[in-house]
Amino acid sequence: MIYEGKAITVNALEGGVVELKFDLKGESVNKFNRLTLNELRQAVDAIKADASVKGVIVTSGKDVFIVGADITEFVDNFKMPDDELIAGNLEANRIFSDFEDLAVPTVIAINGIALGGGFEMCLAGDYRVMSEAAKVGLPEVKLGIYPGFGGTYRLPRVIGCDNAIEWIASGKEQRPADALKTGAVDAVVKAEQLQAAALELVQRAISGELDFKAKRQPKLEKIKLNQMEQMMCFETAKGFVAGQAGPNYPAPVEAIKTIQKAAGQGRDKGLEIEAAGFVKLAKTTVAQCLIGLFLNDQELKKKAKGFSKIAKDVKLSAVLGAGIMGGGIAYQSASKGTPILMKDIREEGIQMGLDEASKLLVNQVSKGRLTPEKMAKALTGIRPTMSYGDFGNVDIVVEAVVENPKVKQIVLAEVEAQVKEDAILASNTSTISISLLAKALKRPENFVGMHFFNPVHMMPLVEVIRGEKSSEEAVATTVAYATKMGKTPIVVNDCPGFLVNRILFPYFGGFAALVGAGVDFVRIDKVMEKFGWPMGPAYLMDVVGIDTGHHGRDVMAEGFPDRMKDERRTAIDALYEANRLGQKNGKGFYAYEMDKRGKPKKVVDPSVHEVLAPILGEAREVTDEDIINYMMIPLCMETVRCLEDGIVETAAEADMGLILGIGFPPFRGGALRYIDTVGVAEFVALADKYAELGALYHPTEKLRTMAKNGQKFFG
């Protein structure tokens, strides 16, 4: 044993070859935390000091290679002064450079996921052999930063600038075939052949058959492009990537600028350029918000794992009510491996559900994400029925019938009599109280809400709603089923609108107030889209459906009359009464026509102004900042109330619900992170400026206390 630590060991093999193995004790994955970096320093020094070493292979004792840096540790470093952070970054980079400079050949055996710092470790080696089961990549831009362990310097010199820019700016994981094609790895082999292939390659280098020093040299020098070639490459890429990323995500373009600045430099200077740019990005609000989202996501996964320990296994599920929603749920379940019965009382409903599932599966095949064989298996996993014949074997039933409490209660009571005693019933309601629906059931402890968002296949969030009598096992089983379906479940307590819709309707309330004050809805949409929303509120309301919005608003008004009841006639009332229901019937705030791909495209429709004219009050001057505040203050305040009321357990879950459920701008981190960014005291003062608009804008007493005490929702 040449070196033994808690994360890394170095063992002597035959013929002067040593194996540097990453195997972090007490963890399911390898990652670059302080311990691992410190041990890598010691391991490299030990190899360097041993004259008997002729070659090195680097392996992993886990199913993954290295998943990247430990963000939970490194996020604390981002609070350090710039010069200290740069110095720390360069110190870590010296370890990678010293490994790269070993006097013997090095081969990296990539057995599984090698991302971020994990892949940067691979780039520091001379040769890379990749398992067919592995993936590599540099996903740092998704966190608002870029690679900081030499990735922006080494990758362009290994695979060329064009490929490196695409890999780094997109942040995508790369499959073995693509990695081999670009030259990111030197060989791809079956998993069981990986160790032997790495040993063979290092022995060929030791024997002199392969010139490892010549292979290494380009990583030490400037990029071999002349000034004109550099300009063509980098300026074109910056323009294209800026257009793709948009103004709110600076990291991809900053990565290109860093590659460009270091193009004419050797390694040490190039790494200094990378470190300076990395620190600049690490200090941005965007990075703090996106890293916060990553940590929130980890918290959600940890909670879901906790629920899985008490969940019952779902081997067969069912959906009541076919159609578009039922077909989407059936597709999601069957495509992820859980067979599902799809029941409807109408033949046409069954056919619509099957058509929806088939369309989604065909689309996956056409995009290369699914083989025809797997599509056929998924389709056979959806069993249409008009009777309860096989429901005795079902583990969970998702009710997705019409949004009417009486109809739902009748259907739920009916199905309860057909299933085994421990089967879970879940209602896909978006607004109706789970505790109310449970009153129709003999076993309310087996009943929960399971709110999917439309379209099911695209929206990642599922709200699992705990009613007054829902058992922990019922909640846990539903969470586990949602996770198995590839969704992100968030457990919330019962209230009108649950979490996401309860927060969304005050946002729409701010919108209604603006339109009532004579502000053009097209202008409002443009301002809010510039703020970062995927679509403005008028367009969103058209997509949701004016009738759905009208019904939801009434439910919210009944549930929270102190702040959500509005006696005034609004734009939603005017459009609803004029039967302008949005995309579903071709006219809402906008008119809709089909584009070349057969998708609805919005166009401005002047006739809507006649419909809206009767609801317009006295026009008032508002700035773009006013528009943002009119809409964001009530949304943020309702998020605060949901947290205070215990509808959701943590700030992380509240923010993730908004990101995943309604497209809250990710670079702003969620409503509570947004308040933190503004400053809690500053947000309270801002809300007080708009207090005349009503109770939706009034800060809670707890928030005022937080402001006085200098508290935050995160950190």
Image: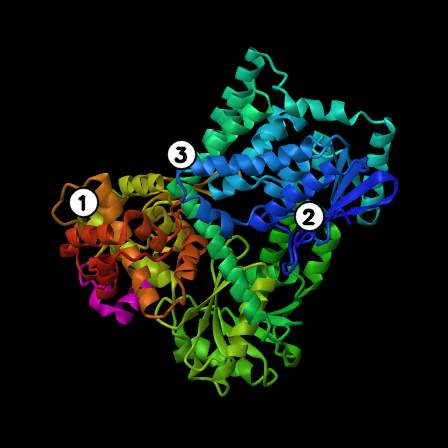
673 w.r.t. 99: above or below:
below
Residue topped by disc 3? 247
Distance from the alpha carbon under mark 3 to that under mark 2: 34 Å
Secondary structure type for disc 1: loop
Residue topped by disc 1? 518
What is the residue that sits farthest to the bottom in this orientation? 442
Residue at the image point whose x is 75% and y is 22% from the top:
214
Residue topped by disc 2? 65
Mark 3 / mark 2, whichever is N-terminal = 2
Mark 1 / mark 2, whichever is N-terminal = 2
Labels 3, 1: front one:
3
What is the residue that sits farthest to the left in this orientation? 618
* Residue 95, horizontal then vertical, whole percent: 62, 37
Q: Quadrant of residue 157?
A: top right
Secondary structure type for disc 3: loop
Q: Quadrant of residue 20?
A: top right
Tell me which segment is drawn in magenta: 552-568
* Residue 260, horizontal then vertical, whole percent: 52, 22
Are the residues at dot 1 and dot 2 in contact (C-beta closer than 8 Å)? Answer: no
Using residue 343 as the reference point, say whether residue 429 is left or right of it: left
617 w.r.t. 51: above or below:
below
